[in-house]
Amino acid sequence: MEKLQQLHDLILEERRAAIDLDNERIEHLAERKAELLAELHDLNFDTNDPALRELAQTIRDENRRNAYLLWSSLRWVRDILNFYSRQMTEPAYDPAGQPVPGGGGKLISGKV
């Protein structure tokens, strides 16, 4: 039960590190969490213990919250990178005022 409580504490600390954008601490906690999970794998628990089941459910829920936080943060960063990596050109028009397909650029639009 003590190891499960340690895992719960690590997961909460991992969330605080993610919120603080502390990558080094996140990496350290991930290593510690992997070690702790390996230790837990070898232990036998009484699955009929209600307190143990409740703690396990809490750990599962908190871990999912962290996973969603990290996933949504990664998606947000990718969206920002995509936005800034797109070519931001002005549309180009021919003398009749019709858009020129695939064209565009600062010189054609008259803006430098």
Image (cartoon, rainbow, N blue to C red):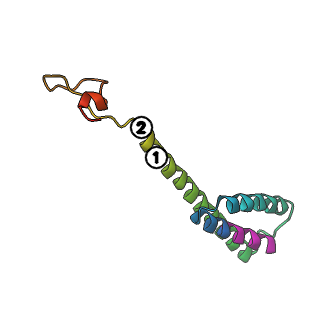
Q: Residue at x 65, y 70 (%)?
A: 58
Residue 9, magenta (yes or no): yes
Is residue 59 positioned above or below 102 on the image?
below
Q: Main secondary structure of the magenta part?
A: helix
Q: Could you say which quadrant of the image residue 54 lies in?
A: bottom right
Q: Quadrant of the N terminus?
A: bottom right
Q: Looking at the rendered structure, which numbered label has been put on residue 29? A: none
Q: Is residue 48 visible to the viewer in this orientation of the structure?
A: no
Question: Looking at numbered disc 1 in the image, what kind of residue is underneath it?
Answer: Asp
- The picture places residue 72, in percent across and down from the top left corner, at 52, 54
Identify the secondary structure beneath mark 2. Answer: loop
The residue carrying mark 2 is 86
Tell me which segment is drawn in magenta: 1-11
Identify the secondary structure beneath mark 1. Answer: helix
Question: Looking at numbered disc 2 in the image, what kind of residue is underneath it?
Answer: Arg
Closer to the camera in the image, 74 or 86: 86
Q: Could you say which quadrant of the image residue 13 lies in?
A: bottom right
* Disc on the earlier residue, 2 or 1: 1
Closer to the camera in the image, 54 or 17: 17
Q: Residue furthest front?
A: 112
For disc 1, the neighbor class at 10 Å (few under 14, some 14 to 19, many from 20) is few
Q: Residue at x 65, y 64 (%)?
A: 60
- The picture places residue 15, in percent across and down from the top left corner, at 62, 66
Is residue 94 positioned above or below 50 on the image?
above
The residue carrying mark 1 is 79
Residue 97, magenta (yes or no): no
